[in-house]
Image: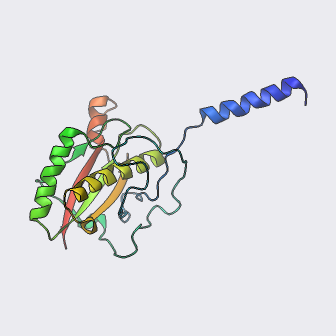
């Protein structure tokens, strides 16, 4: 191969390497909205609240698989909303708990302590930007952040199930930041044991 061909091949490979978006690592993510919930016991990506993307580019191979084989979890359809449990919201492309949302989680933890017989489902949601795979992973990290916060406030981890719907269940469908910020949330649902 001549020098021009070699230089062109190197430039082409460099362009492909730099132009390809990385997908975040995830140990599990939720199936399509009709599937079973993904259970989570601990954060497996970056530390809670760091808001940084992991360096790995792994895609889940079995999205509906539970990470805890010890207990079977109820289906997400068995959980219901409770007016006292308020949603928390996230900044764009982040999963760190914001100070105002920490206060909401404190109140949610108080309600959960008073209702010790209720199981909790945390649904992680994202806005429409990004790939489906990326948003499923980000929604899972958001749900795990809220779970870790609640566990650190005395809620038993065995009561909590997390699921990510990524961008599949928006509460608002306009293509603007005001709408997108509503879609970047964790929703809390309960079920009696």
- 145 vs 82, left or right, is right
Where is residue 38? Give x, y as percent: 37, 63
What is the quadrant of the C terminus in the image?
bottom left
Q: Residue at x 15, y 71 (%)?
A: 117
Please say if 48 is above or below 79: above
Q: Residue furthest right?
A: 1
Is residue 168 visible from the viewing direction of this image? no
Percent position (x, y) of residue 28?
A: 44, 59
Q: What number of labels is visible?
A: 0
Query: In the picture, residue 164 is in which quadrant?
Result: bottom left
Quadrant of the image occupied by residue 94: top left
Residue lying at 27% horizontally and 65% vertically, measured from the top left: 157
Seen in the picture, residue 189 relative to 117 is either above or below; the reply is above
In percent of width and height, residue 191 lies at: 19, 67
Q: Nearer the viewer, residue 102 or 64?
A: 102
State the colouring used for the structure image.
Answer: rainbow
Q: Is residue 70 above or below residue 103?
A: below
Q: Which residue occupies the extreme left position in the image?
A: 114
Q: Which quadrant holds residue 77?
A: bottom left
Most foreground residue, 101 or 121: 101
Compared across the picture, whether 134 is left or right of 72 comes to right
Residue 82 x, y percent position in the rendering: 14, 57
Q: What residue lies at 14% left-to-right and 68% top-to-bottom?
A: 116
User: Can residue 111 be seen from the camera position used here?
Assistant: yes
Looking at the rendering, in which quadrant would you find the N terminus? top right
């Amino acid at each position: 191969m001549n020098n021009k061909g070699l230089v062109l091949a190197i430039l082409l490979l460099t362009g492909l390497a730099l132009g390809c978006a990385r997908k975040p690592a995830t140990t599990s993510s939720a199936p399509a909205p009709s599937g079973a919930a993904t259970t989570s016991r601990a954060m497996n990506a970056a530390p809670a609240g760091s808001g940084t993307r992991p360096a790995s580019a792994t895609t889940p191979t079995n999205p509906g698989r539970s990470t805890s084989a010890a207990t079977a979890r109820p289906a997400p359809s068995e959980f219901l909303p409770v007016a006292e449990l308020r949603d928390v919201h996230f900044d764009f492309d982040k999963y760190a708990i914001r100070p105002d949302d920490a206060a909401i989680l404190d109140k949610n933890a108080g309600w959960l302590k008073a209702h010790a017989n209720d199981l909790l489902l945390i649904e992680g949601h994202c806005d429409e930007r990004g790939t489906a795979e990326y948003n499923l992973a980000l929604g899972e990290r958001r749900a795990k952040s809220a779970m870790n916060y609640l566990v650190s406030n005395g809620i038993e981890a065995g009561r909590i199930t997390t699921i990510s719907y990524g961008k599949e269940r928006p509460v608002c469908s306009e293509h603007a930041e005001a709408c997108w910020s509503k879609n970047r949330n964790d929703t809390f649902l309960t079920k009696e044991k």
